Image (spheres, helix red, strand yellow):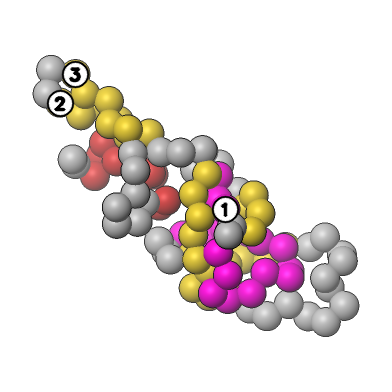
Amino acid sequence: ISAAVVGDMANYMLENTDAVVAVNEGNPLYIELAASVPLRITYTEPGIQGDRSSGGTKPATVETGITVQVPLFIKQDEKVLVDTRTGAYLGRAN
């Protein structure tokens, strides 16, 4: 499937990610993923002590390479749920 068809969904896809591919006469039209996907934080700055309850956010890079705004208490190597429609942080993943 071409990169043009995959589009921004590549930001949320890892190897073996389940996806629905819409096809018309053998030609893929678009890819649809689940509404949210779990992704591991590969880099984020540590939160500052005392900022845990302020409701602030900080940038975090996930394993696919995109940057997501996460709460200050999220740490590197944690898994978080990311909305595939908006790229927003939804919560911690199991």
Q: Is residue 51 left or right of residue 70?
A: right
Characterize the local packing of mark 3: few (<14), some (14-19) or many (20 or more) Cα atoms within 10 angstroms.
Answer: few
| SS for dot 1 | strand
Residue 87 showing in the rendered view: no
In the image, which is nearer the foreground, mark 2 or mark 1? 1
Image quarter of the N terminus: top left
**Gap in Å between the C-alphas at discs 1 and 3?**
31 Å
Distance CA(mark 2)–CA(mark 1): 31 Å
- Percent x, y of residue 88: 60, 48
Give the label on residue 27, or none: 2
Q: Is residue 7 magenta?
A: no
Residue 71 percent location from the top left of the image = 72, 63
Q: Quadrant of the C terminus?
A: bottom right
Asked whether the beta carbons under mark 2 and mark 3 sit within 8 Å of each other, the answer is yes
- Mark nearest the camera among 1 and 3 is 1
In the rendered image, the vertical position of residue 45 relative to residue 68, given as above or below: below
Query: What number is the disc on residue 24?
Result: 3
Q: Which label sits on residue 91?
A: none
Q: Is residue 76 above or below residue 27?
A: below
How far apart are the two marked residues, 2 and 3, measured between alpha carbons? 5 Å
Instruction: Judge the density around disc 2: few (<14), some (14-19), many (≥20) Cα neighbours within 10 Å.
Output: few
Q: Going from the N terminus, do you reach mark 1 or mark 3 first?
A: 3
Give the residues in magenta. 66-83
Residue 22, quarter of the rendered image: top left
Evaluate whether residue 22 shows in this view.
yes
Q: Secondary structure at mark 3?
A: strand
x and y percentages locating residue 65 in the rendered image = 42, 64
The correct choice, above or below, for 51 with respect to 31 in the image is below
- In which image quadrant can residue 26 be found? top left
Sequence-earlier tag: 2 or 1: 2
The numbered mark at residue 81 is: 1
